[in-house]
Image: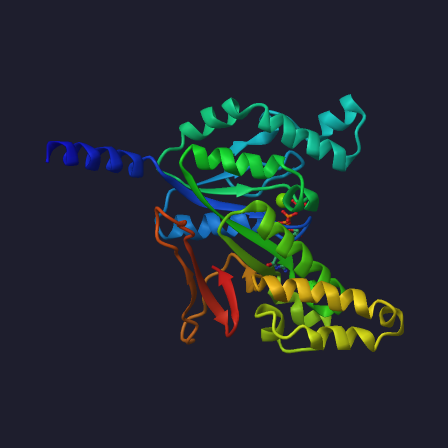
Amino acid sequence: MAEKETCGMAENHKQSSLAFGQVVIGPPGSGKTTYCLGMQEFLSAIGRKVAVVNLDPANEGIPYQCAVDVSELITLADVMENLKLGPNGGLIYCMEYLEANFDWLQEKLDQLKGHYFLFDCPGQVELCTHHNSLRNIFAQLAKWNFRLAAVHLVDSHYCTDPGKFISVLCTSLATMLHVELPHVNILSKMDLIEQYGKLAFNLDYYTEVLDLSYLVDHLASDPFFKNYQRLNKKLVEVIEDYSLVSFLPLNVQVSKPRKGTNEALAVHIDFSPPFYLHLSCILLCLRPGVAHIC
Ligand SMILES: Nc1nc2c(ncn2[C@@H]2O[C@H](COP(=O)(O)OP(=O)(O)OP(=O)(O)O)[C@@H](O)[C@H]2O)c(=O)[nH]1
Ligand SMILES: [Mg+2]
C-alpha cells in the first residue's frame, strides 16, 4: 500500500511538471506570428498564463509579448554577414546553432513554469518537411516534459489555384509525417478568400480534402497542366492513400464578437492531457464556417 502511494506521488509530481502548448509552423508569410499574437491575446483574456517563445531568428518587430527570443542567442542577419551565407542556409545554420545550445533554451523555459506555451517558428519549408533541426528541438522539448501540438498554417490563397492547392497538400502531408506531433492544419487569412475571386469548388471541398480526382480533372482543362495530368494524379493518390490532411479555416482578428448574433462557439480543440496534448484553441465564430480568434 505504502509502495502504491509512493508511486502515486511520483506520478503526481511527474504530471505537475508537464507543460503544454503549440508549435506554430507553416510557410513564409502564412500568418504564424499574427496567430501567436491573436492566440496570446485570446488565452490571456480567458485567464490562461501564456508565454510566447520566438524561435525565428529572422523575426523583426515582434508584435506579441515575447517571453523568450532566440534573437538573444543568434540572429539571421549576423549569420549571413559573418558566415557569408544566404537567407536559407543562414536560417538552417541558426536552427543547428540552437540545437547545439539547448542549455540556453532550457534555462529560459525553466523560468516560465506554469505557463501555456506558443512557439513561433521560422517559415522555411524544408525545416518542417525534411531538415532535422526543428524536429530535434521539438523532441528535446518533449524530453523536458512539454506536450505540444503542431499548428500548421497555410495561406487560404492557395485554394484559388488547383496546382498550388495540390502542392500545399503535399507539403502539409510531408510536414505531418516529418514533425511527428499531434497536428492541426489551418487555412489562414480566410477573411481575404472572397477577394481572391470565385473558388472552383465549395470551401468544404478544400477543408475536408474531398475527392481529389475533381481537382485533377479541373487542372487538365488548363492546356499547360494537361501534360502533367499523370503526375498530378499520382500526387493526389499519395495524399488520398495517407488520408491524413484536412484543414480548419481561420481568421486571426483581434476584435470582439458582435452582439446579438448566433455566432457561437465553433471549434473547440482540447485533447486530453497528459497523453496527447492540450491545445487550447477555443475559437469563436463570427461567420458560419469560419473561425476567428477574438
Ligand atoms: N487579412 C489577414 N491578414 C493576415 C492574417 N494573418 C496574418 N496576416 C497578415 O499576413 C502577413 C504575414 O503575417 P505574419 O504573421 O508575419 O506571417 P508569418 O508566417 O509569421 O511570416 P514569416 O515569419 O515571415 O514566415 C502580415 O501582413 C499579417 O498582417 C489574417 O488572418 N487575415
Ligand atoms: Mg513570423
Left or right side of 1 for 230: right
* Residue 37: x %, y % from top left: 53, 48
Q: Residue at x 56, y 35 (%)?
A: 136
Left or right side of 162 for 44: left
* Looking at the image, residue 167 lies above or below residue 20: below
The reply to whether residue 199 is visible in this rendering is no
Q: Nearer the viewer, residue 284 or 204?
A: 204
Q: Residue at x 45, y 30 (%)?
A: 109
Total labels drawn: 0
| Most distant residue in the left direction | 1
Left or right side of 44 for 2: left
Q: Residue at x 57, y 70 (%)?
A: 208
Q: Nearer the viewer, residue 49 or 206?
A: 206
Q: Quadrant of residue 59 in the image?
A: top right
* Residue 17: x %, y % from top left: 33, 35
Q: Quadrant of residue 84 in the image?
A: top right
